[in-house]
Amino acid sequence: KNQVEQSPQSLIILEGKNCTLQCNYTVSPFSNLRWYKQDTGRGPVSLTIMTFSENTKSNGRYTATLDADTKQSSLHITASQLSDSASYICVPSGGSQGNLIFGKGTKLSVKP
Amino acid sequence: DTAVSQTPKYLVTQMGNDKSIKCEQNLGHDTMYWYKQDSKKFLKIMFSYNNKELIINETVPNRFSPKSPDKAHLNLHINSLELGDSAVYFCASSHFTNSYNEQFFGPGTRLTVL
């Protein structure tokens, strides 16, 4: 059964600090993994997309890693800003139609 | 110049009613989707249309019927609304490929069934 588990469920950090969000998944077959940012009351916005052969990908202050062997991914946020407060969702995909399997997300709150 | 737009943003209605949610994308994509995000915050795909043809139809009650008049539009019609239909519904679009299939989401429609 396809599953995605993210940790922690929620996280509070001070502005300027770094943080790392974790994702474990069991999706078969697997083709790629993406991280989405979802602001409250908005639709998800893609941050990074990695295929199974990629180990790391950056998008500004966001750096995602992927270990397809252990089925783990992480999202590292550097020098957090207040606008980083949102839910971050890990989304592996696979299968012939590339179905996206959404995790529940980690709710990040950045405080001044 | 919103890329993926949905109307209405909020929808409050009584049980048993029939309602529609509209979605339009101006990205030139050939594939559109409907997702449901329930109170537990999981996003689950409901339908996917590629070039106006249904390609994904997850286990969704047949009270839900998508309609794609053209590649830029995918509307969702719901008959005989039930309390459990209360959720946020997201439309998305993409260029369908087997590799990335990057999807762009609309702002969501919050449906409340009383």
Image (cartoon, coloured by chain):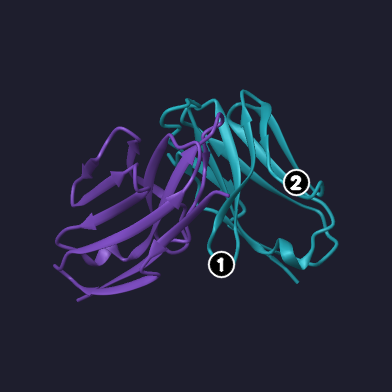
Chain colours: A purple, B cyan
Q: Is B12 situated above or below B95? A: below
Q: Is A55 situated above or below B111? A: above
Q: Position of residue B85 (x, y in %)?
A: 72, 61
The residue lying at 46 percent from left, 30 percent from top is B27
Q: Nearer the viewer, mark 1 or mark 2?
A: 1
Check the residue under mark 2 and report the chain it is in: B
Q: B70 or A34, which is in the foreground?
A: A34
**B56 on left or right of A37:** right
**B5 on left or right of A65:** right
The residue lying at 62 percent from left, 34 percent from top is B73
What is the number of callouts on the image? Answer: 2
Residue that protrudes farthest toward the front in the picture: A69
Q: Secondary structure at mark 1?
A: loop
Report the disc number at residue B24. Answer: none
The residue carrying pointer 2 sits among few (fewer than 14), some (14 to 19) or many (20 or more) residues within 10 Å by Cα, namely some
Three-letter code, disc 1: Lys
The tag earlier along the polypeptide, 1 or 2, is 1
Query: Which residue does the numbered mark 1 point to in the structure image?
Result: B40
Query: Which residue does the numbered mark 2 point to in the structure image?
Result: B77
Look at the image and tell me in which quarter the C terminus of chain B lies. bottom right
Three-letter code, disc 2: His
Look at the image and tell me in which quarter the N terminus of chain B lies. top left
Q: Which of the 4 image quarters holds residue A33?
A: top left
Q: B107 or B37, which is in the foreground?
A: B37
The residue lying at 45 percent from left, 42 percent from top is B2
Q: Which of the 4 image quarters holds residue B70?
A: top right
**A22 on left or right of A58:** right
The residue lying at 43 percent from left, 64 percent from top is A40
Q: Position of residue A49 (x, y in %)?
A: 34, 39
Q: Position of residue B66 (x, y in %)?
A: 72, 39
